[in-house]
Image (cartoon, rainbow, N blue to C red):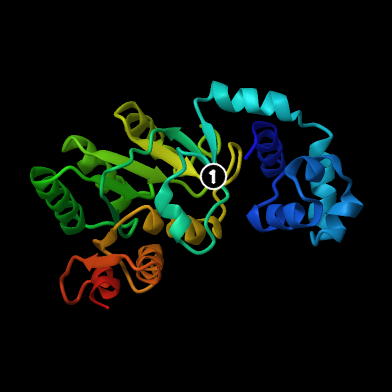
Amino acid sequence: MPPHEKKFLHALLLTGAEYDAIQKIFAALGSFEAGWRTDARALERAGLSQELAERMAVAQSRLNPDEEMRKLVGQGIALVAADEPDFPAELHEIASAPMALYIKGRVKTGLPRLAVVGTRKATAYGREATQKIIRDLADQTEIAIVSGLAQGIDAEAHKAALSSGLTTIGVLGGGMDRESFFPPENWNLAEEITARGGAVISEYPPGAPALPHHFPARNRIIAGLSRGVLVVEAPEKSGALITARFSLEQGRDVFAVPGPMFSPNAIGTHR
């Protein structure tokens, strides 16, 4: 993707348009720059709703693409397009591959990666199992741990990786700026991940809220980055099971930690 196109993609994402809308704009108008320079009526003809087209037109009047790219660089965030060398090659293999990623830190190549996911309401058993498995893996091989920087098992996986000297990658469901980072209590953990040679990545630009529908989409990236997914604890309805399903669809391995037979947090893993 040419550099001038990247700044217009970033600017379009900052208007609140998400990837399905961006793809419609590109298909209809041929470039992100053309999409940026057009009006609400043309955006509607490209397939966007009237509400979104008008909201984008208002946002375009107050955003400067060059200035927004400078802000991004100032935050230490790179927007990496799918055709660039720093884009994780594994994501080319998945359905609905992202056209670009916001990356803070470094996604190391050449390391096998394991996703470790589970419930936000982790038990002491789940936390201990996460720590032990990752610690034992670190004793055997060099591996990177991928998770979603959520509360519970995700945070425990990142912390266990760091304490074991492993690289870890956090995938967000919103912007990676301080104001929109979710959950806010894991901001310092994200900063430690990048400081220790890992990465925090997102499809969503700074300022994007962590909306509920972002998390299932985020989970396809967690699975896609990894050779396999380990589900530590998961109740019957759990985002971790969505990640496991994506992993199976992508031809990856799925592993599950058994739990107490009467525990609600073991229903998903046992299934």
> What crowding class fits label 1: few (fewer than 14 Cα within 10 Å), some (14-19), or many (20 or more)?
some
Q: Which element is circle 1 on?
A: loop
The structure residue drawn at horizontal position 38% and vertical position 33%, both measured from the top left corner, is 106
Compared with 213, 79 (above or below) is above
The image quarter in which residue 222 lies: bottom left
How far from the left and from the top, in percent, is residue 192? 33, 30
How far from the left and from the top, in percent, is residue 221? 44, 55
> Do we see residue 156 in this rendering?
no
The structure residue drawn at horizontal position 8% and vertical position 44%, both measured from the top left corner, is 139
How far from the left and from the top, in percent, is residue 262? 19, 76
Q: Nearer the viewer, residue 27 or 134?
A: 27
Q: Nearer the viewer, residue 210 or 49?
A: 49
Compared with 139, 72 (above or below) is above
Location of mark 1 (residue):
83
Left or right, 94 with reference to 197: right
Left or right, 127 with reference to 10: left
The structure residue drawn at horizontal position 72% and vertical position 42%, both measured from the top left corner, is 12
Q: Nearer the viewer, residue 22 or 175?
A: 22
> Do we see residue 187 in this rendering?
yes
Q: Amino acid at mark 1?
A: Asp
